[in-house]
Amino acid sequence: MAVNAQVVVRRLRDHKFQVRVYDVSCHGCRIDFLTPPRLDDRAWVKFDGLEGLEATVCWIDGFTAGVQFAKPMHPAVFERVLGQLEAQPA
C-alpha cells in the first residue's frame, strides 16, 4: 500500500533514525536511509506500537531501498499499522 509516513529504522551497529516510508506490505516496505544502504544489510523497522521488525535490504536506488521483513506481519497487525501510517501527516 502506498503511504507517505515516518518510521524508526536502526541498522546493525548503528543508531536509530526516523526516516520516510513510502510503500508497505505484510512482507516489507520501501524506505529512505540517511546513508546509502548495501544489498543484504540488516535493519530493524519500528512502527508505532510494535517491536522493531528485522528486515533485509533487497534492492537499492540511491538512499532509497526496499526491505523484506524476516517474518511477515500478520494481516490484522498490518491493517492496524496501515491505519496508523495513513493517519500521520505527510
Image: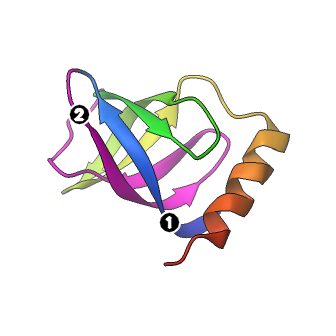
Residue 15 picture location, percent across and down = 23, 33
Pick out the residue farthest to the bottom: 90
Counting from the top left corner in percent of width and height, residue 82 is at 69, 57
In this view, 75 is above or below 2? above
Read off the residue under disc 1: 5
The mark nearer the N terminus, 1 or 2, is 1
Q: Nearer the viewer, residue 90 or 33?
A: 90
Q: Residues within 10 Å of mark 1 (few under 14, many from 20)?
A: some
Residue 27 on the magenta span: yes
Residue closer to the observer: 16 or 40: 16
Question: What range of the chain is rendered magenta?
Answer: 13-40
Q: State whether residue 23 is above or below residue 56.
A: below
Q: Which mark is residue 15?
A: 2
Q: Amino acid at mark 1?
A: Ala
State the image coordinates of residue 45 (x, y, percent, origin top left): 46, 38
Residue 29 marker: none
**How are the residues colored?**
rainbow
Q: Residue at x 26, y 22 (%)?
A: 12
Residue at (20%, 35%) from the top-left corner? 38
Q: Is residue 72 left or right of residue 79?
A: left
In the rendered image, the vertical position of residue 61 relative to residue 43, given as above or below: below
Q: Residue at x 43, y 40 (%)?
A: 67
Q: Quadrant of the N terminus?
A: bottom right
Considering the numbered disc 1 on the image, is that residue within a helix, a strand or a loop?
strand
Pointer 2 local density, CA inside 10 Å: few below 14, some 14–19, many at least 20: few
Based on the picture, tell me whether residue 32 belongs to the magenta stretch: yes
Where is residue 33? Give x, y as percent: 26, 50
